[in-house]
Image (spheres, rainbow, N blue to C red):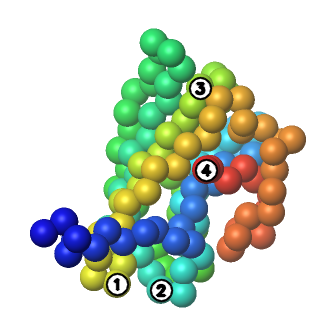
């Protein structure tokens, strides 16, 4: 029965975007990260990202990130400047505590900018957290 189905709620797992210096190309890039602020690791992490604004849509990117230890981060992808004007969505799924978790993280259009920086958990830098 429906009442017997438990749908676990993802907690203490975040997606953030950080503006970082790239030594190789001598430019600042916007990089998306997944943050595991849990006391246990998360396993078989998959992130699916896409950007959209009206009829315009970016390619869908799928990232197999593997396992992420407790209190750790893993880079998902670099975001090009042009897609910051789009809504950027990251759909994250992972296993923890013998359960499958999933959560949709969204950066609304034009919110990825330094004016919206906040202190990020685990990373100890400033960046933008997805809703």
Pointers 1 and 2 in contact (C-beta within 8 Å) = yes
Of callouts 1 and 2, the N-terminal one: 2
Q: x, y percentage for residue 131?
A: 61, 50
Q: Which residue is mark 1?
A: 97
Q: Nearer the viewer, residue 109 or 29?
A: 109
Q: CA distance from mark 1 to mark 3?
A: 35 Å
Residue at x 52% of width, y 49% of height = 105
**Label 4, on which residue?**
131
Label 4 – label 2 distance at C-alpha: 22 Å
Give residue 86's mark.
3
* Rendered residue at 81%/50% (across/down): 117
Evaluate whether residue 21 shows in this view.
Answer: no
Looking at marks 4 and 2 on the same chain, the residue that comes earlier in the sequence is marked by 2
* Element assignment for label 2: loop
Pointer 2 residue: 40
The answer to whether marks 1 and 4 mark residues whose Cβ atoms lie closer than 8 Å is no
Disc 3 residue crowd, few under 14, some 14–19, many 20+, Cα 10 Å? many
Cα–Cα gap, marks 1 and 2: 9 Å
Please say whether residue 127 is visible from this viewpoint: yes
């Amino acid at each position: 029965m429906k009442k017997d189905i438990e749908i676990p709620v993802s907690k203490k797992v975040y997606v953030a975007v950080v503006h970082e210096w790239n030594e190789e190309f001598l430019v600042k890039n916007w990089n998306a990260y997944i943050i595991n602020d849990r006391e246990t690791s998360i396993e078989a992490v998959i992130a699916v990202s896409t950007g959209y604004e009206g009829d315009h849509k970016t390619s869908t990117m799928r990232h197999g990130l593997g396992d992420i230890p407790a209190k750790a981060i893993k880079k998902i992808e670099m975001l090009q400047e042009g897609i910051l004007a789009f809504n950027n969505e990251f759909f994250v799924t992972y296993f923890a505590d013998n359960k499958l978790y999933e959560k949709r993280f969204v950066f609304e259009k034009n919110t990825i900018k330094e004016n919206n920086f906040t202190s990020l958990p685990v990373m100890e830098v400033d960046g933008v957290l997805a809703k």
